[in-house]
Amino acid sequence: MSKKKIIVVGSGNAALCAGIAALEQGADVLMLEKADEALAGGNTKYTAGAMRFPYDSGEDLIPLLRNPDDPRLPDTDFGSYTQAKMTEDLLGFNDGRPLSPEQTNLVTKGLETMQWLSGHGVTFEPIYSRQSFEKDGKYVFWGGLTLAAENEGVGLWEMEMTAFQNLGGTVRYESGVTSLIMEDDIISGVMVGEEAIRADAVILACGGFEANGDMRTQYIGPNWSKAKVRGTPHNTGDGHKMAFGVGAAEYGLYEGCHATPMDLHMADFGGLHLPPGERKNYRKISYFLGVMLNANGERFVDEGENFRNYTYAQFGRAVLEQPNHLAWQVFDAKVDDLLYAEYRFHDAHFVEADTLDALCGKLDGVDPTGAKATLDAFNDAVDEGTPFDPTALDGKATRGLPLPKSNWAQRLDTPPFRAYPVTGGITFTYGGVQVAENGGVLRADGTVIPNLFACGEMVGGVFYNGYPGGSGLTSGAVFGRRAGRGASMA
């Protein structure tokens, strides 16, 4: 019996998981990537490689580690992140919607998928630098996000690509798929320019439309033409258009996307040239330790609403929707040692002053009078009786402000003061296609388009009004594995 021939369109985390899963089932897998080898991997290479998934205790994590003998482990408190907690987190972003079938799959298959990846040599390490604080001699993890690939997204991509090729998978770079071949309502291959490549199944794993300004404007809104694109320039909605062309329906929240505050002066598609540990340094997500001011000098979000894992995607949107699509993050010297490394990055833009008056005068594009009034009112409203604790929702809040800061509110009173200019950066889009339980792409009437599968950012219904940090890579792995298995068994 001849091997089933499967084409995977794209070469990121979801695509590689699909390819690995199909190869496990004995398929012959060809991966077609639009970019050259240096830019292959979609958005995966631009990530910090962190993956959110449920676990009951640190015992679930040890088998996934690259170095299970790390000397810090005996003094590490990973806590737990149960399926119930991840469900609660996702529901918190659903605007009253029940858990979608896609979200249920993400929750119930997350740990299993991580264990599967580990079985293919894809290993992880605790995120000590960004997800833990030292407290009473322990490394205390917070927010349910604990593990990332060594060397971040590039390391994850390299490990998955090694696993894919070791199983016999083939990759062709600079081979952008331009259309699907459909004969008698059945997908039978793809076109790469004028070249027809036949296959028994096609898996679309080629990302969202975040790098397509026209589609961002069409689906998310006119402000989004101004967003900084954090990841690959190649995620331009090609897969969406091809799927729609053969009858797939739009599914999920098309006006939704993952965004985050980014350095106002960064270039689009920036960061991939940086070494591991620095590739995320254009983002600015320590806002919870200070305040954010818009062009009117006003606060516009509750910076301490929750751990930043649960707020940065919404706050990136909020920044972009401010006048002139910008804001300034303001800190004092008390929190210098708690700010993430991205604030000490050599290309980080900031202003500094010894007084708040002088600082407000340096905030380009901001009303200095309004800014000073806002900071004075904030300082007067801080509850001084509650201790500051960055490892917990500490309840150290403001009192009497129309817009509170609910946690980690400290007076801005210790010079020198610094402020960092930010805008909104888009990472990936939420709208996609609907897939069946085996990853097959569905039409609007619920019937399957034969031999067409999808995973990664192509799958709608996973995220709505927000995003628990680290869920995106896990989603890609969960739905990639499912699509690879489904395509090989169809």
Image (cartoon, rainbow, N blue to C red):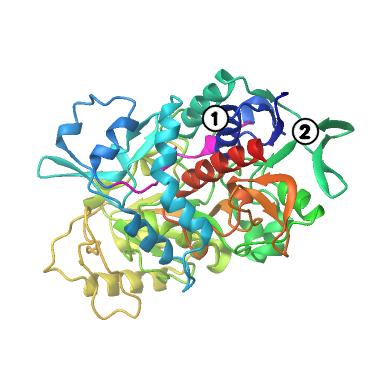
Q: Position of residue 114 (x, y in %)?
A: 41, 38
Q: Position of residue 372 (x, y in %)?
A: 35, 69
**Whole-Å distance between the Cαs marked 2 and 1?**
35 Å
Q: Is residue 174 shown above or below 456?
A: above
Which residue occupies the foreground of this view, 1 or 237? 1
Q: Is residue 250 found inside the magenta-colored segment of the image?
A: no
Q: Which residue is mark 2?
A: 199
> In the image, what residue occupies the spot 55% across and 37% down?
13
> In the image, what residue occupies the spot 28% across and 59% down?
355
Closest to the camera, between mark 2 and mark 1, is 2
Q: Is residue 54 found inside the magenta-colored segment of the image?
A: yes
**Left or right placement of residue 343 versus residue 364 in this view:** left
Amino acid type, mark 2: Ala
Circle number at residue 273? 1
The kind of secondary structure the magenta stretch mainly shows is loop
Circle number at residue 342? none
Q: Name the image quarter holding residue 181.
A: top right
Q: Is residue 365 visible?
A: no
Q: Name the image quarter holding residue 223.
A: bottom right
Which residue occupies the foreground of this view, 324 or 161? 161
Is label 2 in a helix, a strand or a loop?
loop
Which residue occupies the foreground of this view, 343 or 22? 22
Amino acid type, mark 1: His
Q: Is residue 432 visible?
A: yes
Q: Position of residue 268 (x, y in %)?
A: 61, 44
Q: Which of the image's four quarters has the C terminus? A: top right
Q: Residues within 10 Å of mark 1 (few under 14, many from 20)?
A: few
Region rendered in magenta? 40-55
